């Protein structure tokens, strides 16, 4: 499969292997090291014990979960979603994104991505035989380059893949930035896949605004959500998409021919989780914000330039202050020198100059783990040698 040759290796696999070889603290992989709410585990266990989740669920998701997703979209964003025809559940947000790309992109269609991007986006475009077109997250604050977006959208553009809160930069698109993306999409009759897996992981005043809530955008947007990210059960692999009937119907056709169905007991648990009170979501953000602040301050004390994180699990740093120009080189030497693993942005870019000096660190870990990592980094001395 020549079109997939460039995706043979994974930066996550490379760095995780290095972590195991030297016993490093792994701040590369973006998953929590503590479980989510006990009551969700209890719901999943009860579904197994009662025999409600042990056989195939309906191919587009349990009606109970699809209804909970629709209620969630109304509760948090004022979106009216028909659970019967405008929701699809999949094996994590990743499968839903891949299904959407396969459903909506034909041979040679251009897909615009903000780079750096999450690695499955590039693989999904290749699977769909599309053409990647990068738009940088630019400047010291790594904001989306909307002038460049305006330039690259052409009659060959099929869709824009937008991720906010954005992995790996930690940027949350502002209402003004989203409005400009919407204007460009509408003016050029372009579809959008809005990956909003981190929708509840925004901090301070950087409130997440779904693109589909903007005027004219519901009809052209597939919005993706993640139970794993929202409830810290990433191994359960329950994700979903909402959107207009015609687009969701297309995604459903492809998705049912991938995993068909999965996660029956976990779908019951996710339906319960989406109905948790506001305090859960507020406390979740506050806990992660404290860990963000701990890691950000520690990295800054070590001489790294820290990009302010507005959302997600990740802090981004610029390594040039330590004498490095290449984040990949920095990350490959870090496990051996300091016993810590991080991820270079340039692994998520076609234009390596966009991500060259930037490195991503995951803070969705126990405070003791973060402190251990900072102690190791401090003891190693990070200046380029």
Image (cartoon, helix red, strand yellow):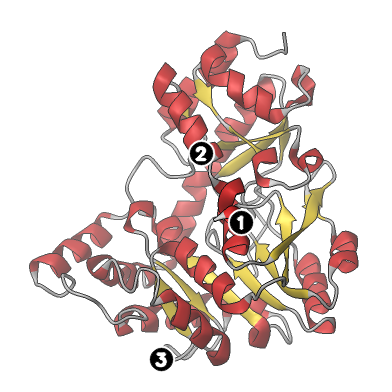
Q: Is residue 363 above or below residue 298?
A: below
Q: Earlier in the sequence, mark 3 or mark 2?
A: 2
Which residue shows up at 81% across the image and 39% down it? 353
Q: Answer whether labels 3 and 1 touch (C-beta < 8 Å).
A: no
Residue 166 x %, y %: 64, 54
All told, the count of numbered labels is: 3
Q: Is residue 55 above or below residue 297?
A: below
Q: Is residue 43 visible?
A: yes
Q: Which mark is residue 3?
A: 1
Q: Is residue 244 above or below residue 381?
A: below
Q: Residues within 10 Å of mark 3 (few under 14, many from 20)?
A: some
Name the side, left or right, on which 366 lies relative to 173.
left
**Which is nearer the eye, 177 or 264?**
264
Q: Earlier in the sequence, mark 1 or mark 2?
A: 1
Q: Residues within 10 Å of mark 2 (few under 14, many from 20)?
A: some
Report the residue marked by disc 3: 84
- Indicate the quadrant where residue 378 lies: top right
Q: Which mark is residue 40?
A: none
Residue 328 x %, y %: 66, 29
Which residue shows up at 78% across the image and 84% down it? 189
Report the residue marked by disc 2: 12
């Amino acid at each position: 499969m020549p079109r997939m040759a460039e995706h043979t290796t994974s930066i996550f696999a490379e760095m995780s292997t290095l972590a195991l070889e030297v016993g490093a603290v792994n701040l590369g992989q973006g998953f929590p090291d503590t479980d989510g709410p006990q009551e969700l585990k209890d719901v999943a266990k009860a579904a197994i014990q009662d025999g409600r989740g042990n056989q195939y669920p309906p191919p587009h998701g349990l009606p109970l979960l699809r209804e909970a997703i629709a209620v969630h979209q109304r509760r948090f964003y004022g979106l009216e979603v028909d659970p019967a025809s405008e929701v699809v559940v999949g094996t994590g947000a990743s499968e839903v994104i891949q299904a959407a790309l396969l459903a909506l992109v034909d041979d040679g269609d251009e897909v615009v991505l903000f780079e750096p991007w999450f690695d499955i986006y590039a693989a999904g475009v290749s699977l769909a035989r599309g053409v990647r077109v990068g738009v940088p997250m630019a400047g010291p604050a790594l904001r989306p380059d909307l002038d460049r977006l305006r330039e690259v959208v052409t009659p060959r553009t099929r869709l824009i893949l937008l991720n906010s809160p954005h992995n790996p930069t930690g940027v949350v698109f502002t209402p003004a930035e989203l409005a400009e993306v919407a204007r460009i999409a509408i003016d050029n009759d372009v579809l959008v896949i809005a990956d909003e897996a981190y929708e509840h992981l925004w901090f301070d005043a950087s409130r997440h605004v779904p693109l589909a809530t903007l005027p004219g955008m519901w009809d052209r947007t597939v919005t993706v959500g993640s139970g794993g990210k929202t409830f810290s059960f990433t191994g359960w692999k329950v994700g979903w998409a909402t959107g207009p009937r015609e687009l969701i119907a297309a995604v459903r056709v492809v998705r049912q021919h991938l995993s068909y169905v999965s996660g029956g007991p976990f779908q019951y648990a996710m339906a319960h989780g989406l109905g948790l009170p506001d305090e859960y979501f507020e406390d979740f953000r506050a806990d992660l914000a404290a860990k963000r602040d701990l890691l950000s301050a520690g990295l800054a004390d070590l001489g790294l330039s820290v990009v302010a994180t507005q959302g997600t699990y990740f802090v981004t740093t610029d390594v040039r202050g330590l004498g490095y120009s290449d984040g990949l080189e920095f990350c490959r030497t870090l496990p051996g020198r300091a016993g810590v693993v991080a991820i270079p942005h340039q692994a998520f870019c076609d234009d390596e100059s966009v991500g060259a000096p930037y490195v991503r660190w995951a803070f969705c870990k126990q405070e003791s783990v973060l402190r251990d990592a900072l102690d190791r980094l401090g003891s190693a001395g990070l200046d380029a040698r």
